[in-house]
Image (spheres, rainbow, N blue to C red):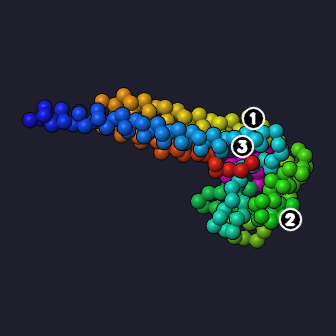
């Protein structure tokens, strides 16, 4: 009786595995395409000026800018990256409010030009500081976004390998569980602006 159940289970698995593999490959190709769009956007910024930090728009507070990360190649930044315990928002750049002014100010500036930022930390009164403009380089892209993309591709490949070589459904589950980390790593390029 146990042999009959095992044969039915094996037949079910061998029938569903090709469909599941095709589904996984389609999802992987969609993720790679989305990731490529984000990286194309970032790579277009290589050689251009930027504020020396990566930023995002905080839609919860009316579109103020939050710092997401700072390249290790540049000096420390007065504003810490946004976290669960503290919120630091940049509310103005050169006294111009709104996130759409960041690219405009950066495009008009040369490397080394001082830029004035007005920040609000944890809802307290605004303060200002000045930071010089930098040039976005290949090395900055690679360390902040390229390596995460490479890791995401690796997770996709290992997941596909585990799924395609699984002799039973538990092996497929191991391969499918690698998909969420791959999603996070591949779509990381969409979480910041230069």
**Which quadrant of the figure has residue 130?**
bottom right
Q: Residues within 10 Å of mark 1 (few under 14, many from 20)?
A: some
Q: Residues within 10 Å of mark 2 (few under 14, many from 20)?
A: few
The residue wearing badge 3 is 42
Q: Residue at point 73% right, 39% down?
A: 43
* 179 in magenta: no
State yes or no: discs 1 and 3 in contact (Cβ < 8 Å): no
Q: Residue at point 74% right, 66% down?
A: 120
The CA span between labels 3 and 2 is 26 Å
Q: Earlier in the sequence, mark 2 or mark 1?
A: 2
The circle on residue 95 is: 2
Q: Position of residue 107 (x, y in %)?
A: 86, 50
Mark 1 or 3, closer to the camera: 3
Depicted 171 relative to depicted 59: above or below: above
Relative depth, front residue between 122 and 89: 89
Q: Earlier in the sequence, mark 1 or mark 3?
A: 3
Q: Residues within 10 Å of mark 3 (few under 14, many from 20)?
A: some
Q: Earlier in the sequence, mark 3 or mark 2?
A: 3
Q: Is residue 107 left or right of residue 68?
A: right
* 74 in magenta: yes
The CA span between labels 2 and 1 is 30 Å
The CA span between labels 1 and 3 is 10 Å
What span is in magenta?
68-78
The residue wearing badge 1 is 138
Q: Position of residue 21 (x, y in %)?
A: 40, 35
């Amino acid at each position: 009786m146990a042999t009959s159940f095992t044969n039915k289970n094996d037949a079910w698995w061998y029938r569903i595995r090709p469909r599941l593999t095709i589904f996984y490959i389609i999802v992987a190709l969609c993720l790679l395409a989305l990731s490529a769009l984000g990286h194309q956007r970032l790579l277009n910024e290589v050689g251009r000026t930027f504020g020396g930090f990566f930023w995002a728009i905080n839609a919860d507070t009316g579109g103020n800018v939050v710092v997401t990360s700072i390249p290790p190649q540049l000096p420390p930044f007065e504003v810490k990256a946004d976290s669960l315990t503290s919120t630091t928002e940049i509310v103005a750049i050169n006294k111009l409010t709104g996130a759409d002014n960041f690219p405009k100010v950066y495009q008009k500036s040369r490397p080394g030009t001082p830029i004035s930022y007005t920040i609000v930390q944890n809802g307290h009164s605004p303060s200002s500081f000045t930071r010089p403009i930098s040039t976005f380089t290949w090395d900055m892209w690679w360390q902040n976004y390229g390596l995460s993309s490479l890791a995401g591709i690796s997770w996709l490949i290992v997941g596909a390998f585990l799924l395609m070589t699984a002799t039973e459904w538990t092996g497929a589950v191991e391969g499918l569980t690698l998909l969420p980390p791959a999603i996070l790593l591949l779509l990381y390029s969409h979480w910041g602006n230069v």
